[in-house]
Image: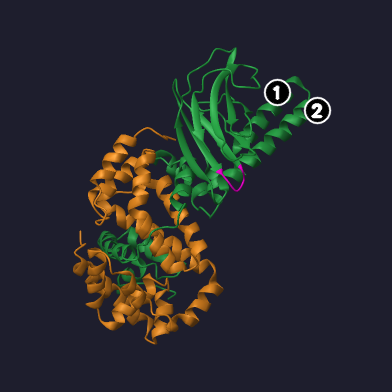
Amino acid sequence: MEVTGGSERGNRARQAADPDAGTGPDLAAQLSLVARGDAAAFDALFEQVGPSVFGTVRRVIRDPAQSEEVTQDVLLEVWRTAFKFDPARGSAMAWVMTLAHRRAVDRVRSVQKQAERELRTATAEIPYDDVIEAVESSLDRERVRRCLNSLTELQRESVTLAYYNGYTYGQVASLLGVPAGTVKTRMRDALIRLRDCLGVAE
Amino acid sequence: MSRIRGRDEHTLAGAYAMDAISAADRDRFERHLAGCQECTEEIASLREATARLGAATAVTPPAGLKERVLAAAAMTRQQVPDAAAADSPVRARMRPGSWLRSLAWPGRLAVAAGAVAAVAVLGIAVVFGVANGDMRQQLDRAQASSQQVAAVLTAQDAVMMNGVVAGGGTATIVMSHSRDALVFTAQGLRALPSSAGYELWLIGPSGDRPVGMLPTGSNGMTEPVIASGLRAGDHLALTAEPAGGTVRPTAPMMLDVAV
């Protein structure tokens, strides 16, 4: 464990970080410092990804206490396995968020009955509007909102129900009353359009 | 959904990138990915998009979450490339609260420290062919201590602090107010002659109490020491004292941390 060592490097990484970008090279650099046990870099990394990880996990899980637990788990996994991040295979933000979303979904599905309960009440929820409500403040959020709006209704609903509620494409299909195969295709089409709209293609 | 083949596999990319897929389908798709460079690249690019969906939900994490994560990380051994393969069966899954299982101060598991000490005592007992009452007591104490350490480290309100030791070295303190206790360890302390040792103190308005001598550890780390019964206004202090310890600090403070 390196408690105080490396703080200079960590501070430098933190200063270079653009708080809004989240996907810049700085985060990747921080992650490689974290892989070497740099506690200051990990602190800075938490500042950058913590809100997105917690927001996503909470959106999927809903329960605040469980969301905190899973967020802690995700960040500890980032700490433990930081060396696995490979910048050639995507951004640091995507790496962290993939871990976070999968953990959140795994947690929800491990409590199957709860998931079924949520599924029954899902039609009463308006996940898309939730997103809109939370997206007032930053340019990034504005762009996500605009790009979600550019999708067809079925594409948008498939994406928000899957990503924000953690449903499988089969569950989404039965919720929307369309064939599973259709939902599957729409999900891929939707993400490709989102990717191009957001300008995050590699 | 029981079989995925042909073009079907490719259309799963969207569902897979959003984890909108059953565990069985996920495994199958990952086997497919292993042999499809194009699909791997597509998934990577779609995940840049899903990451933005996630980032759009960003909210300020609850107070104290960062401190708990940092404290846990400080005591969690990191995987390294060489060890990854060997480690993965054991460390593949982390359950909530279970980070304790992979806690580590370098070279020595914090929670296991008690157990290590217990094993050392047992070893001596075996060497000398005795297991008398003193050793039984030492074993019991070692076990009780490791349980106390674990209780502090896993407390919901555990926070971590670092301090610099005058004369060389750093101290790491994990404190839980709900437990009225803290766990102390230090690294890189200057070596003292065998006639002396580092003694830890609680100093405050309700009196100065010796916590105990820091046990020498490996790799320049001391073994964790628990200080319980914290009171308002207490400071944690470190001094170099005669090896047997003293009842009051007699040497200059080398560390003074308000707890």
Query: Which numbered dot is residue B257?
Result: none
Q: Which chain is green?
A: B
**Magenta stretch: dominant secondary structure:** loop
Q: Are marks 2 and 1 on the same chain?
A: yes
Identity of the residue drawn at 27% across and 49% down = A87
Left or right of B129 on screen, residue B15: left
Identity of the residue drawn at 37% across and 38% down = A38
**The quadrant where residue B193 appears:** top right
Q: Which chain is orange?
A: A
Left or right of B228 on screen, residue A176: left
**The quadrant where residue A21 appears:** bottom left
Q: Considering depth in this image, is A117 or B253 the residue closer to the camera?
A: B253
Q: Give percent across and percent down for residue A2.
A: 41, 34
Callout count: 2
Q: Is residue A57 above or below residue A124?
A: above
Q: Give percent across and percent down for residue B140.
A: 73, 35
Specify whether residue B136 is painted magenta: no
Identity of the residue drawn at 66% across and 22% down = B247
What's the residue type where badge 2 is placed?
Gly
